[in-house]
Image: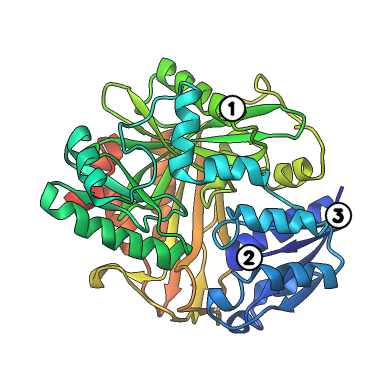
Amino acid sequence: MFRRILIANRGEIALRIMRACRELGIETVCVFSEDDRGAFYLSHADRAICIGGPAPRDSYLKSDRIIAAAEVADADAIHPGYGFLAENAQFAEKCRACKIEFIGPSAESMRRLGDKATARGVAQKAKVPIIPGSDGILEDDGEIVRQADRIGFPVMIKASAGGGGRGMRIVRNKADLLPNIRQAQQEARGAFNQSDVYFEKYLERPRHVEVQIMGDQQGNIVHLGERDCTLQRRYQKLVEESPCTALDARTRKDLCTAAVRLAKAAGYYSAGTVEFLVEGKGRFFFIEVNARIQVEHPVTEMTSGIDLIKAQIRVAAGEPLGFTQKSISSRCHARECRINAEDPDENFRPCAGSIETFRAPGGYGVRVDTFAHDGCRVSRYYDSLIAKVIVHQPTRDEAIRSMQRCLAEFVIEPIKTTIPFLRKVLAHPDFISGNIDTSFVERVF
């Protein structure tokens, strides 16, 4: 097992990793930017090292500074969390070249699955259903138009790298195709320093369902069930739940089996998520792999009883999985709401600033993952996520009622947050009945 781990991230996920390390008896070193200097969560680390200015490109995306900090601190491994460098294969290679373990998948499998266009090819070979789409990266204008005509409009343009909805565009006719390709390429270049894009046939009203996988370096790989991530706004997830009530037993089994088959085909280990779109009749299509821990991983932790961060660390240290597929069972119902510093009444405008009052909910089956507290500051430089509220209850109805209570209790002042909007969503009859799809938020609200 590792003696000391450097955490190359910030905020809620950095604190989550620190707590797991402490329970494993591992020392932690946390890097931070000048904008995060003095943040309370840093006091939970055994050591904190400043690596640069406020902007991510000057700090959390500076791989050489992060590795130098790990060498200075004599860390055995680096945990990247999610975002920033978590899915950067080159960073993983640099870490291992410097005799520092990267807590995540191999660089090779990350390249196979982390790049969305390449992952489609891996899925095809593994006989995992994919949405009809372009053949590789889009470059030549004439070929772009020909392939779109072959697939048929509408199409969804996607950035090959990264995630979070950046570089994504829906195009419904030929006239809008090339201008949207250019915009998607520009956005992808700004977000991921890579402008490669491709497109797929756009499915109008599917559900978005993802499967949590975990593998070790001995070749064992399992799934830990699915999460329904259908409730989204501009491709950003708002609410996640497990299990997905729209799946019958056969579809659930086929979906999870396909996820494991894809991971095995790529020689994958560590935590990862295989994402699918599911149509009304139960047909599902692979869309991408997130080769890292997910923001919504607590949902699966609550239903499976397995600490995914600890499992990641153990696997990176060379230990085998401490569980088998047969030993994993889904318990009850869990859901998560993401609380962001955004103003829903102003088109979800980010609301950086100080939090004067922070009162988190509690009670049976309630978990709150956050870095926030009275007097803390939400930075304009980073993601607006403040907290994640997770509830675990015997049934879906009880989980909804529990979450409604939690959101009513939650106080974050004076900055604006998404709590009032989430309360409206959770009170809507279609949401309560499960009659939703990926366009639900835009159509209804």
Instruction: Rate crowding at label 1 as few (under 14), some (14 to 19) or many (20 or more) other CA atoms within 10 Å.
Output: some
Is residue 233 or residue 84 the one in the foreground?
Answer: 84
Q: Amino acid at mark 3?
A: Gly
Q: CB under 8 Å between callouts 2 and 1?
A: no
Instruction: Name the side, left or right, on which 377 lies relative to 437.
Output: right
Q: Report which residue position mark 2 lands on.
A: 9
Q: Secondary structure at mark 1?
A: helix
Residue 298 at x, y percent in the picture: 57, 46
Quadrant where the image shows the C terminus: bottom left
Q: Is residue 273 left or right of residue 347?
A: right
Q: Is residue 331 visible?
A: no
Specify whether 343 is left or right of 302.
left
How far is the residue under mark 2 from the one under mark 1?
A: 30 Å
Mark 3 and mark 2 in contact (Cβ < 8 Å)? no
Colouring of the image: rainbow
* Residue tagged 3: 25
In this view, 352 is above or below 388: below
Label disc, if present, on residue 265 of the rendered structure:
1
Look at label 2 and name its amino acid.
Asn
Q: Residue furthest top?
A: 250
Counting residues from the start of the chain, the first of labels 2 and 1 encountered is: 2
Mark sitting earlier along the chain (2/3): 2
